[in-house]
Image (cartoon, grey):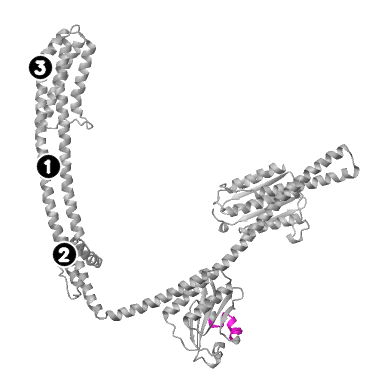
Amino acid sequence: MTKSEEKISGTYGPLADMQRHSISFRIVTVSLLALAIALAMIGGTLWLSWQLEGGAAAINDAGSLRMRSYRLALSMQIQPLDAKRIDSEIQSLEKTLYSLHRGDPARPLVLPSELGIRKQYGLVLRLWDEHLRPLAEHAAKGDSHAAAAFGEQVNAFVAQIDILVSAVEHDNAHKTGLLRLSQAVLIAIAIIGTVAMIYLQYLWIIRPVASLQAGIANLATRRFDVRIPVETDDEFGELAQGFNAMAEELQTLYRGLEQRVRDKTAQLEAQNRELAILYEMAAFLSHPSSVEAQCRGFLQRILARFHADGGSLRILDQGDQQLNLVVSENLAPEVLQSEQCRKAHDCLCGESTRTGVAVLRDLRNTPRHRILPCNEAGFSQIAAFRIASPQAALGSFTLHFQQAYPISAAEMKLLETLGQQFGTALENTRLMKHERLLAVSEERNLVAQGLHDSLAQSLNFLNLQVQMLEKALVRTPHGEAEKILPLLRTGVQESYNDVRELLANFRTRLENLNIKQVLQAATRRFYEQSGIEVEFEYSGEGPTLSDEQKLQLLFILQEALSNIRKHAQTHSAQVLVRNDSDFYMEISDQGVGFDAAPLPQQSNAARQVGLHIMQERADRIGCQLTIASTRGVGTRIAVLLRAASRQTA
């Protein structure tokens, strides 16, 4: 035997043996055996019942052959001969005769497979096929001699049918006896199996349970020296071993139970104090207040709970990595104003903030060349803990003790947890402020939309007034007004068109459209509004973009097309989109163009603002925006979104 085989045998052999001796294995085995026997007996009785039912149907059909044979013979004696009736009787008799051979599981109809029955059925079938059916067919054609011969032979045919019926009845009687015998055996098996299962349950379960109950009753009376005999290798044997081990353990524990109770009581009291501090701090931090009020309330509660003589709380500036003091209690000005205490990399507070590990320092034996401001202020011990949110370190708080205070490991852990709790509350306060700023920004956007709506109404009114003025001048000409009116009408109409385009862009909805449909709809809408033809070319089947990216790309396209309408002085434009792993969009025209100098140097203020807006939108979604233009040649604006910056919807 190899080493691997020995290892397998040594590992799995005892496990397999233990499984064979387990109660569950024995119960399952006995149950499966009983189930198999019961199913076999039930299946046998069902099969016999089905055979008996099919045999009864066969007896009925075979018996009906006698009646059909005599009825066919009677039909041949009636003059004149009715050929149609004779043919019908022949078909009815043959259908019944052949159905005995085929059988019918649905009825059921089964002709027993016993050899004598099959031979007798074959004899009946041959008599019909070779003698009676030819005579019946000739009689149907008007042959009276054939009809007479059929009448002479029908009695012999019926006699053979009687023999067949008797054989089937004998077979059914035999199967009925077998069915009764199997039912009697099934009843005997049920009785024996029930008695056997009761005995086995008593042997395997009831007796071991009674033994365990007796042992538990002894334990209830504090007789910890009681032991249960281990008589089997099954689960109850394991329970007996476990009970004995438990009794021995209880016997050992009971001797020192009072001390253990005192220790556990002290431990629970300490845990209750920790929970009380955590609940008190959570209740305080849940009330809305300023950052400074939260810091002061947090520090004061920490100092009171841990009997510290002073303390401070500092917030980390992520930019210059300095700890800025927010609040302090009972600390001298030289400690608070120390340059060393403001640098995160020089002081104990900064060490705790950087590493996340609580710092506990005994200052009584500090060397002279490393004297800290805390030493000079008369403190003999200092403890620093980090304030942190799940995202980042926010600062630290320190406790100063004039006399050495033994901080246990549990208290250290509690102070670290309080620092995390306060850091989360501080971060939530900052997030709430940020949310308020976002709400203000959203309100400003709504105000901007309202201004646009009111401006559109005003421009529409001015447009109507200019039209009315134009009609009035047609009736009453005025030379100077006729020169100013076209310029005024053009300016008002252009402003009205700008506002209409702006409002249409504001009302853009992405819904469930893909990027191709969104951009194509924008170009179609631009053509309907401006009359400038746009050649739209789209290729590629890249990943789906997020709604934010689709929206910003749409706004860039709308701004570029708006600039073409306002400044390009052209009748056509081109939009090329390649949506592969990278997304590329290019908007070009062959208009008048402009000098592609840096954006701040452009003289056209409207164009400068539009290009700045496109650049800001591209930066928002991580795109690269390229603007190329030459006077007299045209303008090309390209947007490239790399695969790494894509966001799926």
In-front residue for pair 53/454:
454
Which residue is located at x 49 percent, y 91 percent? 364
The residue under label 2 is which amino acid type?
A: Ala
Q: Kindly state the secondary structure of the residue where label 3 is placed.
A: helix
Residue 515 falls within the magenta-colored stretch: no
Q: How many dots with numbers?
A: 3
For residue 440, side relative to residue 280 (left or right): right
**Residue linked to disc 3:** 155
Give how far across and how far down residue 432 sits, in percent: 57, 65
Q: Name above or below for residue 410 compared with residue 642.
A: below
**How far, Cα to Cα, is label 3 from label 2?**
80 Å
Which residue is located at x 14 percent, y 57 percent? 200
**How far, Cα to Cα, is label 3 from label 1?**
42 Å
Which is closer to the viewer, label 1 or label 2? Answer: 2
Give how far across and how far down residue 643 sits, in percent: 56, 56
Q: Kindly state the secondary structure of the residue where label 2 is placed.
A: helix
Between disc 3 and disc 1, whose residue precedes?
3
Q: What stretch is highlighted in magenta?
A: 335-348
**How far, Cα to Cα, is label 1 from label 2?**
38 Å
- Point out which mark residue 251 bears: none
How packed mark 3 is, by other alpha carbons closer than 10 Å (few <14, some 14-19, many 20 or more), is some
**Residue linked to disc 2:** 210
**Residue linked to disc 1:** 183
